[in-house]
C-alpha cells in the first residue's frame, strides 16, 4: 500500500471516512498521524524534500496591496514613457507580437 487508503464510493461512507483522523500504514503497522506534532510532521516533510535534492528558500516580493505599490508603479511607468530606448523596445515588441504568420 502506498500510504493512502481507498475512499469508499458512496457519499455517506466517503464523508464518514474523511472524518477519521489521518492514518499511515508502513509494513503492516498502522499509526495515527495525529500523535506526531506539527513540528515533527514539518521536519519529516522537509527531510523528504531535502533527500530529493531540494532546498528551502525565502522569497520576498513587493506587497501589491499597499497604496505605495500603485504609486511606485505609476512613477516608474511615467519615467519609462520619456525614455527613447523604452519606446523603441515597445515598438519592436508590438511588431513582433503582430507577426504571427505561419503559426498554426
Image (tube, rainbow, N blue to C red):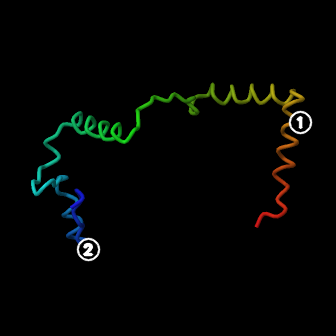
Q: Is residue 64 left or right of residue 95?
A: left
Reading the image, the residue beneath label 2 is: 9
Q: Counting residues from the N terminus, which is met first, the one under dot 2 or under dot 1?
A: 2
Of 22 and 101, nearer the camera is 101
Mark 1 Cα-neighbour bin, 10 Å: few <14, some 14–19, many ≥20 = few
* Number of callouts: 2
Residue sitting at x 81%, y 25%: 79
- Seen at 80% across and 28% down, the residue is 78
Circle 2 SS class? loop
Q: Tell me what residue is drawn at x 84 percent, y 47 percent.
A: 94
Q: Quadrant of residue 39?
A: top left
Q: Residue at the location (81% across, 29% down)?
A: 80
* Residue nearer the viewer, 37 or 16: 37
Disc 1 marks which residue?
88
Q: Where is residue 17 in the image (x, y as percent from the top left)?
A: 19, 63
The picture quadrant where one finds residue 6 is: bottom left
Q: Residues within 10 Å of mark 2 (few under 14, many from 20)?
A: few
Label 2 vs label 1, nearer the camera: 1
Distance in Å between CA atoms under marks 2 and 1: 61 Å
Amino acid at each position: 500500500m502506498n500510504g493512502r487508503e481507498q475512499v469508499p464510493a458512496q457519499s455517506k461512507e466517503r464523508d464518514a471516512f474523511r472524518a477519521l483522523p489521518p492514518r499511515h500504514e508502513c509494513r503492516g503497522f498502522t499509526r495515527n498521524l495525529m500523535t506526531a506534532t506539527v513540528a515533527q510532521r514539518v521536519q519529516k516533510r522537509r527531510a523528504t524534500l531535502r533527500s530529493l535534492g531540494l532546498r528551502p528558500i525565502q522569497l520576498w516580493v513587493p506587497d501589491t496591496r499597499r497604496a505605495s505599490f500603485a504609486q511606485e508603479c505609476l512613477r516608474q511607468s511615467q519615467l519609462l514613457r520619456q525614455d527613447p530606448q523604452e519606446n523603441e523596445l515597445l515598438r519592436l515588441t508590438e511588431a513582433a507580437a503582430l507577426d504571427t504568420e505561419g503559426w498554426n
